[in-house]
Image: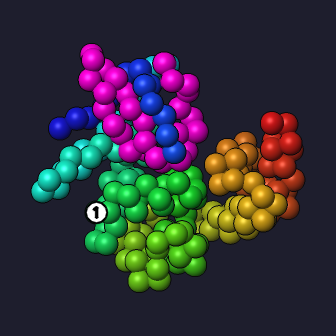
Amino acid sequence: MIGSVKGKIVLKTEKFLILETNGVGYKINVSPDTVSKAKKVGDEMMLWIHTHVREDILDLYGFLDHSELEFFEMLISVSGIGPKGALTILGVASIDTLRKAISTSDISYLTKISGIGKKTAEKIVIELRDKMAEGISEKKGSSLRDELDAMEALKSLGYSQNEIREALKKVLPNTDTNTKIREALKTLGNK
């Protein structure tokens, strides 16, 4: 199994990167967040890899940090969630936001993700809630609601999911919705 790949970026698309290592180009499926953080063609990059093998296909899925890989592997352990669905889920919000949504059983948040219906969202919550709840207090549940509300407000202003996620990372975690929006808009305005 391939555990990681470090190489030169040869091709960068919206859904995958090709990294060349020792003359071999590896096509690695990645999340939109990873694509946005990938430097330009010709630069070197290292990705943690999940190797997905089916009857006639061998696909590689790449992640910038090991915790993202672990979260991806937890998602694909849920029946009905494949690797592409898990990448879609990871592309919507930060891992912390997704952990909070799952640990607080916020099915309405999960169903906003393209391709995730109510039954699949319930499966995700039932199968992963206990794993996500470790270390997350009830107080953080209201913080999650504030972050989700801020994300919706910023999305309605025309910002992309990646721009919103990056801006919200720079906002203090335990602030109310209005403060999150204000601070995120300052960050977005500086671009």
Residues drawn in magenta: 15-42
Vertical placement of residue 128 versus 48, above or below: below
Residue 74 in view, yes or no: no
Image quarter hosting the N terminus: top left
Q: Nearer the viewer, residue 59 or 63?
A: 59
Q: Position of residue 6 (x, y in %)?
A: 36, 24
Vertical placement of residue 98 versus 60, above or below: below
Residue depicted at 51% across the width and 45% down the height: 14
Q: Amino acid at mark 1?
A: Ser
Classify residue 48 as left or right of residue 107: left
Vertical placement of residue 129 versus 30, above or below: below
Vertical placement of residue 183 versus 156, above or below: above
Which residue is labeled 1 in the image? 77
**SS at circle 1:** loop
Residue 1 in view, yes or no: yes
Residue depicted at 82% across the width and 60% down the height: 157
Query: Does 22 lie within the magenta span?
Result: yes
Q: Position of residue 191 (x, y in %)?
A: 80, 36
Q: Nearer the viewer, residue 78 or 18?
A: 18
What is the quadrant of residue 55 in the picture?
A: bottom left
- State the residue lying farthest toward the bottom: 119
Residue depicted at 40% across the width and 62% down the height: 85
Q: Few, some or many C-alpha atoms within 10 Å of disc 1 (few <14, some 14-19, many ≥20)?
A: some
Classify residue 63 as left or right of residue 159: left
Residue depicted at 44% across the width and 62% down the height: 132
Q: Position of residue 165 (x, y in %)?
A: 66, 50
Q: Nearer the viewer, residue 115 or 164?
A: 115
What is the quadrant of residue 11 in the picture?
A: top left
Q: Nearer the viewer, residue 47 or 68?
A: 47
Classify residue 124 as left or right of residue 187: left
What is the quadrant of residue 51 in the picture?
A: top left
